[in-house]
Image (cartoon, grey):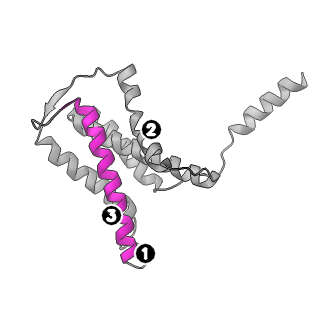
Amino acid sequence: MKSVFKKVLGGALAMLPTAAVANPACPICTIAIGAGVGVAESLGVPSVVVGIWAGALLTLLGYWMIKFFDKRGWKFWGRDVLLIGVSVAMIGFAYVGDLQYTPQEIWSVIYLDPILFGALLGMVVLIVVEKLYEWMKRKNGGHAHFPFERVVLPVVALALVSWGICYCF
């Protein structure tokens, strides 16, 4: 009886809110990207655009995993690339469950599913913008140029790429 009580008490304690252990980007950015995916699907936006936002969200989750590994002191060669790759590869679970892989010719260069192409494009855009932000911040003495710059840059970049890609598909 005591072991059952300990398990129930341990489970209840595990559900209590605690401090965040990883925060590489502002939570507002995460919410904006997640909401962007939901809004795009409901409005009937092309699937490649939904993929762009989904890829950015999964990349952001990869950044969170990197920060989590940093806090734990888990360092090994190729860790960051592996964690980002694994997080973006989670788009594959959508194909296992709900989506059907339907490749199309894209710009007469590659033959890929539009959602998968968008996810890869969203990943690249978010990584490039994150590196751009870090460079701009370093050039400005370690300070952002304006409030919420870290949020505005990726959201605006993803919105511009989404808008531009709508005319290509």
Where disc 3 sits, the SS reads: helix
Determine crowd level at label 3: few under 14, some 14-19, many 20+ residues with C-alpha closer than 10 A: some
Could you tell me if residue 22 is visible in this image?
A: no
In this rendering, the answer to whether 34 lies above or below 22 is above
Principal secondary structure, stretch drawn in magenta: helix
Q: Quadrant of the C terminus?
A: top left
Q: Which mark is residue 86?
A: 2
Q: Tell whether label 1 touches label 2 (CB within 8 Å).
A: no
User: Percent position (x, y) of residue 129?
Assistant: 32, 58
Q: Which mark is residue 108?
A: none
Say which label, 1 or 3, has the lower sequence index.
3
Q: Between label 2 and label 1, give the one nearer the viewer.
A: 2
Say which label, 2 or 3, has the lower sequence index.
2
Where disc 1 sits, the SS reads: loop
Mark 2–mark 1 Cα distance, whole angstroms, equals: 31 Å
Residue 91 placement: quadrant:
top left
Q: Is 131 within the magenta?
A: yes
Residue assigned mark 3: 132
Could you tell me if residue 128 is visible in this image?
A: yes
Residue found 27% across the figure and 56% down from its top:
156
Q: Amino acid at mark 1?
A: His
Q: Amino acid at mark 3?
A: Leu
Please provide the residue range marked out in magenta.
Answer: 111-139
